Amino acid sequence: MANKITDVEVNIGDRFPLTIRRLGVNGHGIGYYKHKVCFVPGALPGEVVVAEVTHVHPRFLEAKIHRLRKKSKHRVTPRDPYADVAGGFELENLAYPQQLAFKRQVILDSLEKFKPYGYRNYEVRKTIAAPEEYHYRNKAQFQVRMVDGHVAAGLYKPNSHDLVDMRECAVQMPRTMKVVRTVVQLIEELQIPVYDEDHNSGIIKTIVVRESWTTGELQLTLITNTPKLIHKRPLLSAIADQLPEVVSVMQNVNPGDTPLVWGDQVIHLAGKETITESLMGLDFALSARSFLQLNPEQTEILYEQAAQALELDKEDTLIDAYAGIGTIGLSLAPRVKAVRGMEIIPEAVANANDNARLNGIDNAHYEVGKAEEVIPKWLAEGLTFDALVVDPPRAGLDDELIKQILRVKPRKFAYVSCGMASLARNLRRLTSVYHVDYIQPVDMMPQTARCEAVVKLSRRR
Ligand SMILES: C[S@@+](CC[C@H](N)C(=O)[O-])C[C@H]1O[C@@H](n2cnc3c(N)ncnc32)[C@H](O)[C@@H]1O
């Protein structure tokens, strides 16, 4: 395919030397070919590559490294053999201190888009490093497909549905990988049909394994296309024999060809329904569909940052919005008068209320619902609150929720964000009432381009 970008004819397969100027938000190297942006995955700032065009878009190019002519002094050898081919390891070839600097820069770049609003003045602190650069990830969520006549489990190549069969993975906790690979072998031996996207047939779509950092308990969830799981008995008996560390086996039914990984129906197959993780000195029961931060050791540091940003006292009523299993609110409950929280996954809310009881906390209560709907309902019921912590998914805060926050103006406000573009967009509106005291990046996912930050906001006088 040829495409004319202004005065330059560019074709897929064209090669040219390219100097990499910086990294984009997705961790890809950026250079300029005849004034057009060219993204090159795996290329690092300061490097000169011979780029080979892989996609031509109207406003930019994508290319791969054909040859590395000049190497960055910060380039390191990735531990993962799949780092170049599977998505999710974008920075594994970059030395860790530079990864940390990149994550801070992503925040600055995201804010820069809103520069007329004075964002250059915000204090964006240095990224807090993770205690472990590898083997930190407590959850493996791998697609299962047939590849070359064998059952394969892993991640897709970027922008494709080509599955990379991952036999090892340096960012995963090792026991999660052992469970994945054993289950893959069992599926193959028992000839349980795996999902076929082209024909929307077969059964097993995804394997999810979660490990508790503190108790060592493992939970296996098989996400299936149908409620029926053939050869269930021999599968469960082999899991019990070969993987005694798996204390909970669940099934989630997600029928059809859908971009969503999880469905609504959860079936309990064996063992317990939850595993227990301990964070901030509290025990948390965790159901299969409930969210938990992926890097447990660093989670405590993230929450401590949220606590510092909130500066709570005993008279405060705190709202824990987007609560998951209540980890943030419950860890702060002893410091305040009351905690109210909400979350959209019903099992997570059940976990949060059980977790309050389990830990002898009687001043916290969680409800099922969307933040943007539950908070106005509470306000209509007469609830007043002094402090708010929000921890939304990557898409950020709903417009309606922002409106409510700007109306109520809680005195103490911390925003925990995993999406820097939505954070910058949301701050643009929030700063009509709030001042950004600082933004503290915390690296939750080394080797990836993903960023997390805690923002301390204080009400303008
Ligand atoms: C990034 S997680 C944070 C969870 C928790 N604070 C933690 O640290 O583990 C975001 C959570 O928000 C939930 N969620 C998504 N949209 C929501 C909404 N509109 N209202 C409330 N919760 C929502 C998700 O199910 C998920 O559990």
Image: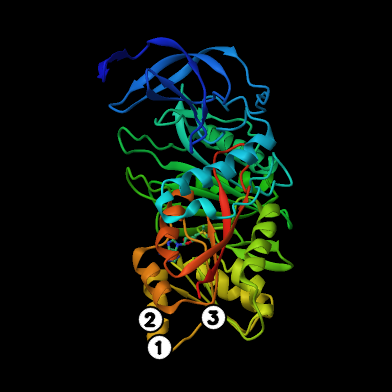
Give the crowd class for mark 3: few <14, some 14-19, many >=20 residues within 10 Å: some
Q: Is residue 330 above or below residue 51?
A: below
Task: Read off the residue under disc 1.
Answer: 381
Task: Read off the residue under disc 3.
Answer: 386
Picture quarter containing residue 286? bottom right
As drawn, the label of residue 377 is: 2
Specify which label sits upstream in the sequence, 3 or 2: 2
Q: Is mark 3 within 8 Å of ligand 1?
A: no
Picture quarter containing residue 432? bottom left
Residue 355 position within the rendered picture, expressed as x and y whole percent measured from the top left: 62, 72
Q: CA distance from mark 3 to mark 2?
A: 17 Å
Kind of residue sitting beneath label 1: Glu
Q: Is residue 265 visible?
A: no
Q: Nearer the viewer, mark 3 or mark 2?
A: 3
Near-viewer residue (371 or 141)? 371
| Residue at the spot 66% in from the left edge and 84% down from the top edge | 314
Q: Is residue 433 above or below residue 174?
A: below
| Residue at the spot 70% in from the left edge and 40% down from the top edge | 133
Q: Is the Cβ of the residue at disc 1 closer than 8 Å to that at disc 2?
A: yes
Specify which label sits upstream in the sequence, 3 or 1: 1
Residue 337 position within the rendered picture, expressed as x and y whole percent measured from the top left: 62, 85
Q: CA distance from mark 1 to mark 2?
A: 6 Å
Kind of residue sitting beneath label 3: Asp
Give the crowd class for mark 2: few <14, some 14-19, many >=20 residues within 10 Å: few
Q: CA distance from mark 3 to mark 1?
A: 16 Å
